[in-house]
Image (cartoon, rainbow, N blue to C red):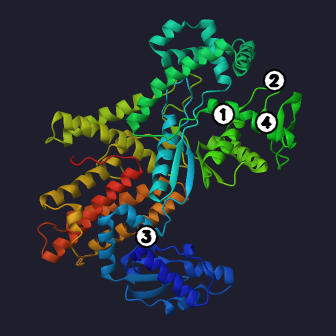
Amino acid sequence: MNHPAHLLRDLVYHAAIKAGFTLQANDIRLERTKTLQHGHFATNLAMNLAGKLSKKPRDVAEAIARELKNPLIQKIEISGPGFINLWIEQKFYTDECHEILNGLDDYINQSLGLDKGNKKMLIDYSHPNIAKPMGVHHLLSTIIGDSIKRIYQAMGWTVVADNFIGDMGTQFGKLIHAIKTWGNLKEIEKDPIPNLLKLYVQFHFEADKDVELDDAARAEYKKFEQGDPESRQLWKKIVRWSFMEIQPVYDRLGVQFDHLNGESFYEDKMPAILKQGRSSDLFTDGQDGAWIVLSDNPDEPPAVIRKKDGVTLYITRDLARIAYWEKEWHPERMVNVVDVAQEFYFRQLFGVAEKMKLTPAKNVHVAFGRMQFKDGWMSTRKGNIILLNDLLDEAEARALKLAREKGTELTPAQQKELARVMGIGAVKYNILSQNRLHNMTFDWNTMLSFEGNSAPYLMYTAARAQSVLRKGKITPKNAARYELSFSDDRERILALDLTTYPETIRRAADEYKPSFLATHLYTLAQDFNAMYNDLKILQAESDASKKTRLLLTGATVEMMQHGLSLLGIEVPEKM
């Protein structure tokens, strides 16, 4: 069966071919028009083709429009510099709503013409450091990465989620030295992570007064890399303590990984990387015998692969990771969700990996801005980190107050569960609704508002739509037996929101920006509420209008739940 939305793109594609133009089916992008007066869908295909062929866009548009004939299309109009505007007949929207209610995942795959399961992505996100509590700065990578994973799964990709945990590096030399100098293992074990953090901060405080401490830390780490039994045993305890702290945070956030292959996992895989780079003369001698890779840009510093004392670096382990991912999974893409401060590092890493021919996969750095608070930037080194669990506790406490105010018909247990869902969802949505390339500031009032672009507003909209169906004694699936018969523009606008969902997912995936999806859901919620507030649903003026609005309500419920799940956000049934 040719899916309606997919059919519409096919019609435009074949019309362009008949008009004598050369293009690929994926070149077709249909966008929703801003107002119904300019049609339902529009494409800038003519302008794209005209630019390549040195022709007038309107001439190209008119040539395509002459070949664009199908009962699905009610009207065609050329507007502006060469947009092709399309008015679509009513049955198209009925078919779309039926497809949504009969299986939203299949609807997305068929609408976008996807080959489900044929593409594979490896994605790394979160990567906290061992021996430190998870701070709110870990939220961005964790939440953005988890949503990107979910979005690509909805696009039919096989996605393997890895967590390149920081369990090696010179910071462990500092921590080991601090434990040996000022620590007590029995006392540490009573409350491991806070005690380890105190020792780590103490090291930096003392190192500010005694510069030789940094040399002592480097010596400790070199002993660790060389297999010193005491250092290794201490490191294993630190790793065990850390996982006892980290995993409950992931459980609380509903975030899961397929693998937790930290830096130490690649320890026995680094020698092969060093040998390959050295034997090919790619790794050359730098200052004092360090191994480096010169940049193609003479103004950029070289990539240091191994220090002068033989100690490896983060990039050494990252190269081993890329080689392992290729050997184990042969993915089409390797994605790293890391803040924008590491942009130059990833350029170096990907450049070296390409020169070594470690993988034919597309390496991607998904950069994001930082989380900003009124009291300035956070720093683990200075000890003023804002703990992730503390932030989540605050979110749930504030949400519980709202749940008690708004959910007066709920039991105390239901209010507490609503507070959990709403609090965690508000934190996630606050991150995902913003452009990831910008810095983000927490605003509790906005995050937990029942008005405006927030998780509670979307949750309340979904719960409201579910309530309508319950009162009408109908499920979303049952609504699929109804037909659409538009009597108001608010109905058609809502139908347009529903039918443009797959393209929104495609765009969110292509640009690694869940914010596109969040914006779509916010628009859907606004337009559903416009219909709910301005038009009667269960007491509609006619049976045809009642069925139309119930069908749209059922599809809205399915899409809100699906879309929020791609953001990693749960939806309560009652609020």
Q: Is the residue marked by circle 3 packed among few (<14), some (14-19), or many (20+) residues within 10 Å?
A: many
Q: Nearer the viewer, mark 4 or mark 2?
A: 4
Residue in the picture at 27% in, 59% down: 557
Whether tag 4 and tag 2 are in contact, CB under 8 A, the answer is no
Q: Which residue is mark 4?
A: 274
Q: Which residue is the extreme one toward the front?
A: 328
Provide the secondary structure element on which disc 2 rests: loop
Callout 3–callout 1 Cβ contact below 8 Å: no
First-in-chain label (2 vs 1): 1
- What residue appears at the point 15 percent right and 40 percent down from the top-left corner? 408
Q: Percent position (x, y) of residue 460?
A: 26, 51
Vertical arrangement, residue 284 with respect to residue 362, above or below: above
Residue, disc 2: 309
Quick check: 268 left or right of 378? right
| Relative image position of residue 539 (x, y in whole percent) | 11, 68
Q: Amino acid at mark 2?
A: Asp
Q: Secondary structure at mark 1?
A: helix
Indicate which disc residue 111 carries. 3
The answer to whether residue 292 shows anywhere in this view is: yes
Residue wearing tag 1: 266
